[in-house]
Image: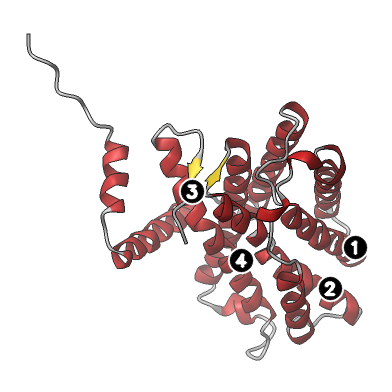
């Protein structure tokens, strides 16, 4: 009786084919995939406000994964303290701005997220500091804070609110877009990412994509007028969109390797050398 011919998973075949392509082809495929996703979201989601709800829900799910890791596994290995501190900084600033400028449901959501983030920082700094690999978390915080602050002074919303509040709001947007960089740098240094940290970062990537999709669909629906609804010389809304796109692309490469590892049945995410 002859041996049965092994069947290959079509998804694995697809990933294998993509890996063999040139950088230009991979870039083209990535752009096409993003455009197809945006088109699907545009026709499937009627109320575009749901993008923000879904984004915040996915971000909350990522934080729950971190809480599980810290409480059950009693280790913070693979987590960047600096990314968590940057997250706490922009959340605290945004919470203050939200309270004095809007005071809506997002204020409550930001408060809950900030408390959870501060708890994660406390666990890394004090309770589980023995498992924190400080030498791998080597990206200085001021690399992100200083450029964000300078950019906020130059480009910020022009509303009736106090100028300090407007600058602080812009600072939140810019800092959030780069706050994940220390985490990605730490994972790149380690070359391998354990499951719970990878789940958390992947959740951030999906949340950012949904936020970015909201802005892009708004721009498409208004034929670009949405970006300049306050006048042609008004740069704030284009900068918000740019910040969303930057953060999405920062996380896109990791999300690719995350999906690839899940499809291959691997628990650890292996990142390629820089």
**Residue 176: in sight, yes or no?**
yes
Nearer to us of marks 3 and 4 is 4
Comes first in the chain, label 2 or label 1? 1
Secondary structure state at the residue bearing disc 2: helix
Quadrant of the frame with the N terminus: top left
- In whole angstroms, how far apart are the C-alphas of marks 2 and 3? 35 Å
- Circle 2 sits on which residue? 168
- Residue 157 makes an appearance in the image: no
Q: Distance between the residues labelled 3 and 1?
A: 34 Å
Question: Badge 1: how crowded within 10 Å, few (<14), some, or many (20+)?
Answer: some
State the residue in front, 60 or 267.
267
Q: How crowded is mark 3: few (under 14 residues within 10 Å), some or many (20 or more)?
A: few
Q: Earlier in the sequence, mark 1 or mark 4?
A: 1
**Mark pair 1, 4: CA separation:** 21 Å
Residue 244: x and y, percent?
A: 61, 66
- Residue 220 image point, x, y percent: 50, 70
The residue tagged 3 is 44
Identify the mark at residue 96; answer none if there is no mark. Answer: 1
């Amino acid at each position: 009786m002859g041996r049965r011919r092994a069947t290959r998973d079509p998804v694995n075949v697809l990933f294998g084919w993509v890996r063999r392509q040139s950088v230009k082809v991979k870039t083209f495929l990535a752009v096409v995939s993003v455009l197809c996703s945006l088109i699907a979201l545009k026709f499937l989601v009627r109320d575009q406000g749901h993008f923000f709800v879904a984004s915040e829900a996915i971000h909350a799910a990522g934080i729950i994964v971190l809480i599980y890791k810290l409480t059950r596994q009693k280790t913070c290995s693979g987590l960047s303290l600096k990314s968590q501190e940057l997250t706490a900084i922009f959340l605290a600033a945004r919470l203050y701005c939200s309270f004095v400028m809007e005071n809506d449901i997002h204020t409550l959501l930001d408060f809950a997220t900030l408390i959870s983030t501060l708890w994660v920082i406390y666990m890394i700094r004090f309770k589980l500091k023995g498992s924190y690999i400080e030498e791998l978390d080597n990206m200085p915080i001021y690399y992100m804070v200083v450029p964000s602050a300078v950019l906020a002074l130059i480009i910020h919303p022009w509303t009736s609110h106090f100028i300090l509040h407007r600058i602080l709001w812009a600072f939140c947007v810019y800092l959030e877009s780069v706050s994940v960089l220390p985490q990605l740098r730490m994972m790149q240094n380690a070359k391998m990412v354990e499951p719970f940290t990878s789940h958390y970062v992947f959740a951030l990537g999906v949340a950012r994509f949904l936020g970015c999709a909201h802005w892009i669909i708004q721009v498409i629906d208004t034929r670009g007028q949405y970006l300049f609804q306050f006048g042609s010389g008004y740069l704030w809304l284009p900068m918000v969109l740019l910040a969303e796109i930057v953060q999405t692309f920062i996380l896109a490469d990791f999300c690719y390797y995350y999906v690839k590892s899940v499809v291959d049945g691997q628990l650890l995410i292996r990142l390629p050398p820089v």
